[in-house]
Image: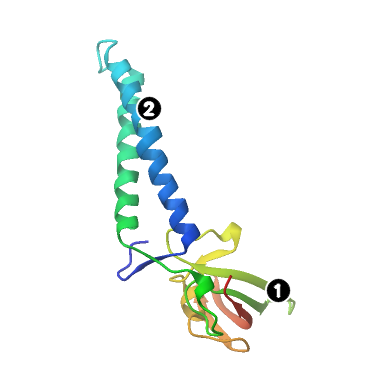
């Protein structure tokens, strides 16, 4: 994360980041501040585990709030549904096939999303990842070779849609 350039987000990705920010700011931080105040009232802070843990957790929350604030301020929200083209761009849902070492073909369906919202388990990959970058600008029928940490992959683009 943190490469130069725009911080593209889908509307769903923006909502998720904003919800996390709001929860940290309005629920978790005030709760932790109160817990730290209560722990501090018990006296000697140097040996007060609840106080020490609370201060540590408060720092973690503050760091995450600052990070999310910067990412949200720099966000460029792009709604994939506004695109009706056939060229792979940010937000596209792409179906590809690739052949494994045994000669068997496997189909993958990925949505190209922002760095702050990628989730391989949900088939969302970053548009800045090696695979994402190699797919940008391609169309159905194109064959793409991409170098990955596990070696070179050859992908054949089957479909490009915007949902």
On the picture, is 149 further left or further right than 69? Answer: right
Q: In the rendered view of the protein, which quadrant contains the N terminus?
A: bottom left
Q: Position of residue 63 (x, y in %)?
A: 30, 43
Mark 1, residue position: 106
Towards the viewer: 115 or 79: 79
Quarter of the image for residue 14 reads: bottom left
**Secondary structure found at label 2:** helix
User: Is residue 37 something that shows in the picture?
Assistant: yes
Write the residue at 57% across / 74% down. 162
Q: Position of residue 28 (x, y in %)?
A: 39, 33
**Secondary structure found at label 1:** strand
Q: How many marks?
A: 2
Is residue 61 positioned above or below 10 on the image? above
Is residue 119 positioned above or below 41 on the image? below
Towards the viewer: 74 or 44: 74
Q: Which mark is residue 73?
A: none
Label 2 neighbourhood size at 10 Å, few (<14), some (14-19), many (20+)?
few
Q: Position of residue 13 (x, y in %)?
A: 47, 58
- Of pointers 2 and 1, the one earlier in the residue sequence: 2
User: Is residue 117 something that shows in the picture?
Assistant: no
Q: Position of residue 89 (x, y in %)?
A: 48, 78
Q: Are marks 2 and 1 in contact (CB under 8 Å)?
A: no
Write the residue at 55% across / 64% down. 124
Single out the residue that lies furthest toward the front.
82
Towards the viewer: 24 or 64: 24
Mark 2, residue position: 31
Q: In the rendered view of the protein, which quadrant contains the C terminus?
A: bottom right
Marks 2 and 1, how far apart at CA:
48 Å
Is residue 26 positioned above or below 133 on the image? above
Label 1 neighbourhood size at 10 Å, few (<14), some (14-19), many (20+)?
few
The colour mode here is: rainbow
Write the residue at 29% across / 47% down. 66
């Amino acid at each position: 994360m943190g490469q130069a350039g725009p911080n593209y987000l889908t509307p769903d990705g923006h909502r998720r980041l904003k919800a996390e920010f709001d929860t940290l700011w309005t629920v978790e931080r005030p709760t932790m501040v109160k817990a730290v105040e209560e722990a501090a009232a018990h006296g000697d802070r140097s040996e007060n585990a609840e106080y020490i843990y609370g201060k540590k957790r408060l720092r973690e929350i503050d760091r995450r709030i600052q990070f999310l604030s910067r990412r949200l301020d720099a966000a460029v929200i792009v709604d994939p549904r506004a695109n009706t083209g056939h060229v792979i761009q940010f937000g596209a849902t792409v179906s590809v096939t690739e052949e494994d070492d045994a000669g068997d073909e496997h189909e993958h369906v990925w949505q190209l999303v922002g760095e702050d919202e990628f989730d391989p388990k949900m088939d969302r990959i970053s548009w800045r990842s090696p695979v994402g970058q190699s797919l940008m600008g391609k169309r159905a029928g194109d064959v793409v070779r991409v170098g990955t940490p596990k070696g070179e992959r050859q992908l054949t683009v089957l479909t490009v849609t915007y949902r």
